[in-house]
């Protein structure tokens, strides 16, 4: 009996593996209609698994999953959707998720936008490329296969992948734009309507592989309104604040199951006390670019706050030493976690941080020291049940993706010491959950696989 059951299991696993390979390679296998052998029928269908899986939620200043505090370790790979469009590059997505799972990483932040650029998701206002939507479908399924949840960003302040510049250009070309300023993205009624059409289309998208709408898929941990929003023409912060309030309410009117964050870098603004303004780096001490961290994060529809950290860029004019960059980094992260604990009552995630390998005098050991310092602060907060929920490396990539590298890119297999450091953080955060939940068990399994 045991022998026969084992053979049946091998057959099922073999078929399942082939199915997974087929859909991710060719993108046309609909998992809703795949028939696996009837014995043993132990696992739910992909649709049933997605619908039945628990959502990450917020309780006060902590993330929760399955009734327990959730302490994810994460990373950024912004290019997932783009690379899942064409068959020749899809294996990069699989390899990245596989490498991440081996390090115990459980959350990835990535772009769910591409406006008017190559492989655009939105080719013009309200018009979408189904090929690219299917690519995002594949990313969601592949993430779920590796036990990874996603934070999906919905727009870009920068011009890469279209950004707010593309929305302004569309409105201007159609003769409905109020201004050619990029900041009209935040106040032009026509552009705000463009963005709402995109939001509704994305949130109600039905995954062609699982049949599950995005708003019902717990593989998505959260939506992020915009990557690094700035409104430089209104340093009071009022314009950006009104936009966040309006768009956050709109997202929540469609999807109340998922968490929502703004995507800010963390700059303190006009409503912050002098002690907090003094934490701002370099030129940001006097110019917050229209953002106001505490005020933005207090919006009721915003579930958690985000910050970014780039001491190389932010302290460039001061010609900061390595030690000065490190001290600033620790002060920056600790200050915002304190805000989450005392002022906001919400989790704070460091959703981007990195150290440039092109900085003068760079040594890989410097990066290891910075990463460890940030990880220690986050772990210390998590261990005491504080607001410091996670820190996400910017950015990770598998081998052979040099065209997507920037000053901060890391290929884990090429940097063993950093890979070990990332894995150690995953392990100690997972241990805080004492193995409760699938995510923690996967991370602890990766820990048990060795220290390499």
Image (cartoon, grey):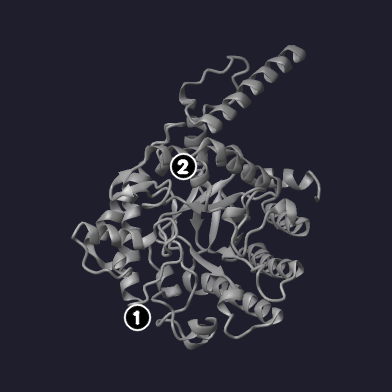
Say which residue appears at 18% left-offset and 60% top-offset: 175
Instruction: Between label 2 and label 1, give the one nearer the viewer.
Output: 2
Crowd band around label 2 with a 10 angstrom C-alpha radius: few (<14), some (14–19), many (20+): many
Quarter of the N terminus within the rendering = top right
Can you identify the residue that label 2 sits on?
A: 136
* Corner quadrant of residue 393: bottom right
Q: Earlier in the sequence, mark 2 or mark 1?
A: 2
Instruction: Left or right? Give the position of 127 relative to 347.
Output: left
SS at mark 2? helix
Q: CA distance from mark 2 to mark 1?
A: 37 Å
Say which residue appears at 41% left-offset and 40% top-offset: 133
Residue 180 visible in this rendered orientation of the protein: yes
Q: Nearer the viewer, residue 181 or 145?
A: 181
Instruction: Left or right? Give the position of 403 relative to 82.
Output: right
Residue 320 drawn above or below residue 86: below
Q: Nearer the viewer, residue 41 or 278?
A: 278
Say which residue appears at 64% left-offset and 75% top-offset: 330
Residue furthest left as drawn? 175
Q: Point out residue 74 in the picture as x, y percentages from the top left corner.
A: 61, 55
- What mark, if any, has residue 236 been given in the picture? 1
Residue 70 visible in this rendered orientation of the protein: no
* Corner quadrant of residue 338: bottom right
SS at mark 1? loop
Say which residue appears at 37% left-offset and 46% top-offset: 203
Q: Point out residue 123 in the picture as x, y percentages from the top left corner.
A: 34, 47
Instruction: Left or right? Give the position of 306 relative to 42.
Output: left
- What mark, if any, has residue 377 been given in the picture? none
Residue 294 drawn above or below residue 444: below
């Amino acid at each position: 009996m045991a022998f026969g059951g084992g053979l049946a299991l091998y057959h099922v696993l073999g078929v399942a593996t082939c199915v997974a390979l087929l859909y991710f390679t060719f993108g046309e296998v609909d998992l809703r209609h795949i028939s696996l052998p009837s014995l043993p029928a132990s696992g739910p269908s992909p649709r049933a698994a997605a619908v039945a899986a628990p959502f990450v939620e917020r309780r006060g200043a902590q993330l929760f999953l399955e009734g327990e505090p959730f302490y994810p370790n994460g990373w950024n790979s912004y290019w997932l959707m783009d690379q899942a469009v064409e068959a020749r590059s899809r294996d990069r997505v699989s390899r990245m998720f596989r490498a991440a799972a081996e390090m115990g990483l459980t959350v990835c932040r990535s772009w769910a936008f591409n406006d008017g650029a190559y492989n655009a998701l939105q080719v013009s206002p309200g018009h979408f490329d189904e090929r690219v939507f299917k690519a995002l479908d594949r990313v969601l399924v592949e993430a779920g296969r590796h036990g990874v949840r996603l934070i999906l960003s919905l727009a870009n302040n920068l011009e890469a992948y279209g950004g707010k510049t593309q929305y302004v250009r569309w409105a201007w070309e159609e003769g409905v734009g109020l201004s050619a300023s990029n900041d009209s993205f935040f106040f032009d009624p026509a552009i705000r309507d463009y963005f709402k059409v995109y939001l509704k289309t994305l949130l109600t998208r039905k995954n062609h592989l699982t049949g599950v709408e995005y708003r019902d898929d717990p593989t998505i941990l959260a939506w992020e309104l915009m990557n690094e929003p700035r409104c430089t023409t209104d340093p009071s912060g009022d314009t950006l604040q009104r936009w966040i309030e309006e768009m956050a309410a709109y997202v929540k009117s469609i999807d109340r199951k998922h968490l929502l964050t703004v995507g800010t870098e963390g700059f303190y603004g006009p409503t912050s006390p002098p002690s907090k303004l003094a934490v701002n780096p370099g030129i940001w001490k006097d110019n917050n670019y229209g953002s106001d961290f505490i005020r933005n994060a207090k919006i009721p529809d915003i579930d958690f706050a985000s910050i970014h950290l780039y001491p190389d860029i932010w302290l460039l004019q001061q010609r900061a030493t390595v030690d000065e960059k490190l001290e600033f980094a620790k002060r920056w992260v600790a200050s915002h976690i304190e805000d989450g604990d005392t002022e906001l009552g919400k989790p704070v995630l460091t959703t981007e941080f990195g150290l440039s390998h092109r900085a003068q005098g760079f040594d890989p050991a410097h990066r290891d020291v910075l990463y460890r310092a940030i990880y220690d602060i986050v772990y210390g907060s998590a261990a005491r049940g504080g607001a410091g929920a996670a820190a996400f490396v910017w950015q990770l990539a598998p081998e052979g993706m040099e065209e997507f590298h920037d000053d901060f890119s890391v290929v884990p297999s090429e940097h063993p010491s950093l890979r070990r450091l990332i894995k150690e953080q995953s392990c100690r955060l997972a241990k805080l959950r004492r193995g409760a939940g699938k995510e923690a068990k996967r991370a602890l399994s990766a820990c048990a696989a060795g220290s390499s």
